[in-house]
Image: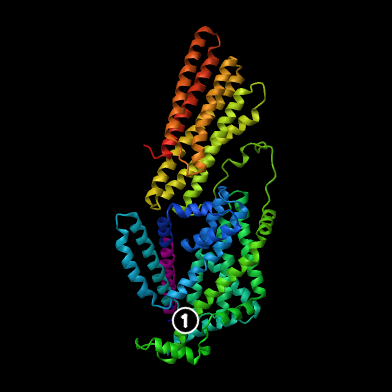
Amino acid sequence: MQHIDIWEFVIGFLYVLGGLGIFLFGMRVMSEGIQKVAGDGMRRIMATMTQNRFFGLMTGLLVTCLVQSSSATTVMVVSFVNAQLLTLMESIGVIMGANLGTTLTGWIIATIGKFSLSKLALPIIGVGLPMIFASKPVFKNLGEVLVGFGLLFFGLSELKDAVPDVKSLLKSSELKDQLLVQEIQSFVEKLNSFGFGSVLIFLVIGILLTLLVQSSSAAMGITIIVAINGWINFEIAAAIVLGENIGTTVTAWLASLGANLNAKRAARAHLLFNLTGVCWMLVLFYPFIGMVDEIMPGAIYQNDVTKEELANYREAHLQEGDGLEDGKARKAIVDVNIPLHLSLFHTLFNLCNICLLIGFAPHLGRLAEKMVKPRKRTDKDPVPGSLASIHYEGSGLLPKTGELNLALVEAEVDRLAAVTRYMFEGFVDVFEHPEEDRGKLINELNELEDKCDELTFEITQTLIHCTTESLAGESALHVTSLLRVTAELEDIGDCCHRLVQLAHRKYRKQRILPEETKKEIKIFSEQILDFMELYQTHLKDKTVLPEMEVAEQIEQRIDASRKMLRKSAVKRMKESENVKAEMIYVDILNEMERIGNDALNIVHALNHVV
């Protein structure tokens, strides 16, 4: 008998996991589908509509409502801060909006929950499935949204059926059902027997639940279902919801582990904001619960259901022929009311927290800065004023969302372009100052070449990941363009590295060139920098496309200059004994001309020219 009970428990637990799995998979499919439908627009919103904390608030609210996960939004925020797309102050506003946006899930469950979830889910999947096979990307992506939406509610329906209904088990005549109810009730009553300490216990349970499913929206859905099935009352569910608000900050904290200083601070600001909110809510917990109960009509306990509510329910379900028994009617009324009460509690809590703390956003930022202090400088660090802030510092955990990830990749490509330009300017500096010790700069430039390789690898890996996410048409074309741009920039970095080595060898071996030759290199290098400025302008401002005609004219001037200067060098080789110096000079010209070719290829890629 004991073995049968264990197997029944295992099978029941697997049913719960299965329902949860369908729910989470549906949420992911719906989220990715919405991103594809929104396409370029949503990631532009995330990257640009954050000029101040209020704009950031609206941005976080909008994005979280779309992706249905505040954890996903805050991971994006941390990544965007790491890529210098957002400042610390801007990120705090987005985080506040994300907390409010995640309350939408509760309202969807509470509102749709008035109907049969399984009856609603399957027709939605039926409508969306044929659209997935459409040739037009818009219909295909919209079909994906509908299928995800249907799977989400089908998963909720299965989860609701898999979790034992305490109220139904109470009426069961079977001994094992009665024993199960007694165990559940005794366990919950034991945890709920510590007064205010019980609120703290269930708050910790909420934290652990969110850590387990890695989504506060999913945790909210589970909490509502458990409350509907009679395992916990409204007060306990509210305490669990508070715990979920703290648990959702862990994902962003994990995302910041490999990130830069400001990204770590953004994750700490998220923790501070949610933790502060929970602290003041614990002080006002019972009055706040009472206020929610007053604002939202409807009983949340069967014994509190009024005759008027029963009459209204019977009138509404008169045609259906079921649910007219007093016990069933009371249960059905409470099943509808509890999700609405919980959703209102969650929304009001986050709204009040934002109103209280949005004025203190600068203080939260300063506190986060004190919590995460910059490490002390060492002799191995780059000299002040150099590109210490530009070199690759690691992207941490990237958000696994194709469309939104593109904004992060664009920033990394822009950074790679800045690094390669700095390397070229470093070569010019070394070449023009043979009389000065540039050993430290040369070492830094050599290290930057390795950083270029690392950054190129990270960008390429992320772009490949983006292509596996079945991006919308324009975004897929953009990914192809960025892959080509990254490859060309990496080649420019290699050329700059070789140029630095040539300049270093020239002065180490004391190869002397005429003053006129140095001036020619200076003019030649200015043409290269003009080319770099042309494509960097587009990488920083995507609304400006680099002009093809201008690019081709610069490239033609570079080719003509290289040919003319090479002829002069060959002529001097015949007349001069300093042949080795002239050979280094020709190698420098060849590398610079190759950079010009790479720069033209970048402009072609940005204009989608094959």
Residue 515 visible in the picture? yes
Residue 528 versus residue 144 in the image, above or below: above
Residue 483 versus residue 333 in the image, above or below: above
- In front here: 265 or 142? 142
Magenta run includes residue 7:
yes
Q: Which residue is depicted at the point 47% across and 81% down? A: 335
Please provide percent x and percent y for residue 257.
Answer: 58, 53
**Residue range corresponding to the magenta coloring:** 4-28
Residue found farthest to the top: 575
Please provide percent x and percent y for residue 116.
Answer: 38, 77
Quarter holding the N terminus is bottom left
- In front here: 433 or 579? 433
- Left or right: residue 38 compared with residue 130: right
Circle 1 sits on which residue?
335
Residue 204 visible in the picture? no
Amino acid type indicated by mark 1: Asp
Quarter holding the C terminus is top left
Q: Tell me which secondary structure the magenta stretch mostly adopts.
A: helix
